[in-house]
Amino acid sequence: MPARVVLPPLEDQGEVYVYLEAPPDEARQVSFTVASLAAVGDDGLGVPLMIASSEISWVKERPQRLLAFGRLPVGLYTGLAAKFAKATLTRAGGAADLLVPEAPVTIPLTFRAERARSDLISVSLARAVASDHELAFAPVFAAFEPRLAGRLTAVNGYCTSDTLASLSVFDKHRHEVVGVIPTGREPQGLAIDANERRLYVALPGQDQVQVFDLSTGEELRRVSLQPGDRPGELALTPDGRLLITANRGSNTATFIDPFSGLTLDQVPTGDEPASLLMDRGARRAYVFNRRSSDITVLDLATRQVVATVRTDAEPLRGQLNRAGTRLYVIHRGSQYLAVYAVPELTPVTRLYVGLGASALKVDPKSDLLYVGRADEDRVQAYDPYSFVPIDSIEVPGPVSYLTIDDVENALVSVIPSRRTVAFTDLTSRRLLSEVELAAEPFHVVLEAERY
């Protein structure tokens, strides 16, 4: 297995992400292999980019493909140069290999790489096959640089990848990445304040929480925690007045005033707090401690630990039912999903789900319980009264995190092995689309998320 490479934050360089948009119908018959892609400076020299997707073919579930990304010296660039290794034309009569150009294909676009800024370039394939010789791959591309600030709207979702120092912004209706925002080191957990248009990002690599203005995409401030805290996940009260971090490095939880950026209190949790759940009334928060196999219960009014509850081995995540009277917990080291009565936190029952449960989400509209798996390409739906599995939803790969988009009525699955975030319609159970990222996604948060 290759070593895990964590990129440092952008400082004296710029960064670019090149996405290929879905082509016209006639061009979708052509698939091709990208050998290299470079950004061409105004001196005529190319700066190689990292190829993200070398094999390009078109399916309706992926309207946009990430071609390449990389860091660039600050300066002016006149376009992109793409070298192709192979191309194939597929029609009703079968598939035929196309002749590919020996020289790199120029994609004209003037753009400037600026210090500590990430840019997205959208490329469209206007034509794929030469009109006078259909066995020649003669691509004609157009490119433009969309303005991020104008696309930070209430239809967006945000996704971190902890090996990148950036945050992907995607349109959750069109299922396309619309921009990239530079962050600090190892961005992980996210929390969104839709009213104030603020986004909070946990930075375990710098023991900080980064705060962004979602109207402009600009950083507002950073909240510094204690050295070695390594905050992983975040929870924000509905009124936006209290932010909590679960700190894996120090086995603590920190209470923060989001408006002043001041740390209010820090309390001990169990060992290796893996995730954090806040109830809908903002009365309690639950910290799921993987190594010590317990739950730390926090009272938000007093900012104190009020209970510790033993669990099966390695609790990963928890969810509350619609009424807030049942707490469901999945575990890495147990085949059972545990059910606790709230607020007493006494065990009610255990539901067999098998080893491999990795993601959990309760739909507050239906009270259905969705369980994602780290070893199967499916999400299981359970009835909240009988705890009988009533449906199995196919997803593109093993799931590490689940949430629900309230506006689109879509189940949103984080699929690390495919570097995607997948959208599934909850009515038809049909896969709608996948959003492709540059690295394994860690966490996702949506505007108008269903809680």
Image (cartoon, rainbow, N blue to C red):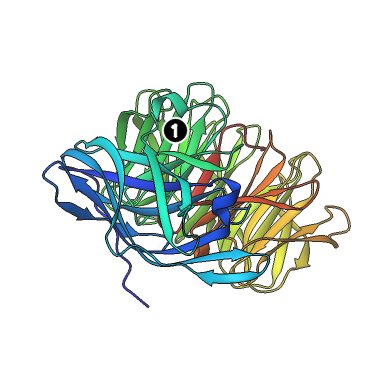
For mark 1, does the 10 Å Cα neighbourhood hold few (<14), some (14 to 19), or many (20 or more) residues? many
Residue farthest toward the right in the current orientation of the protein: 386
The picture places residue 419, in percent across and down from the top left corner, at: 48, 59
- Three-letter code, disc 1: Leu
Residue with the mark numbered 1: 199
Q: Is residue 342 above or below residue 293?
A: above
- Marks counted in the figure total 1
In the image, 76: left or right of 169? left
Residue farthest toward the left in the current orientation of the protein: 43
In the image, 245: left or right of 95? left
Q: Secondary structure at mark 1?
A: strand
Q: Residue at x 45, y 59 (%)?
A: 440
**Can see residue 252?**
no
Quadrant in the picture for residue 11: top left
Q: Is residue 25 above or below residue 196?
A: below
Q: Is residue 165 above or below residue 56?
A: above
Residue farthest toward the front in the current orientation of the protein: 132
Q: Residue at x 43, y 24 (%)?
A: 150
The quadrant of the picture occupied by the N terminus is: bottom left
**Can see residue 305?**
yes
Quadrant in the picture for residue 394: bottom right
The quadrant of the picture occupied by the C terminus is: top right
Q: Residue at x 46, y 67 (%)?
A: 98
Residue farthest toward the bottom in the current orientation of the protein: 1
The picture places residue 374, in percent across and down from the top left corner, at: 59, 68
Quadrant in the picture for residue 388: bottom right
The picture places residue 352, in percent across and down from the top left corner, at: 76, 70
Q: Nearer the viewer, residue 60 or 248?
A: 60
The picture places residue 291, in percent across and down from the top left corner, at: 48, 67
Q: Nearer the viewer, residue 122 or 203?
A: 122
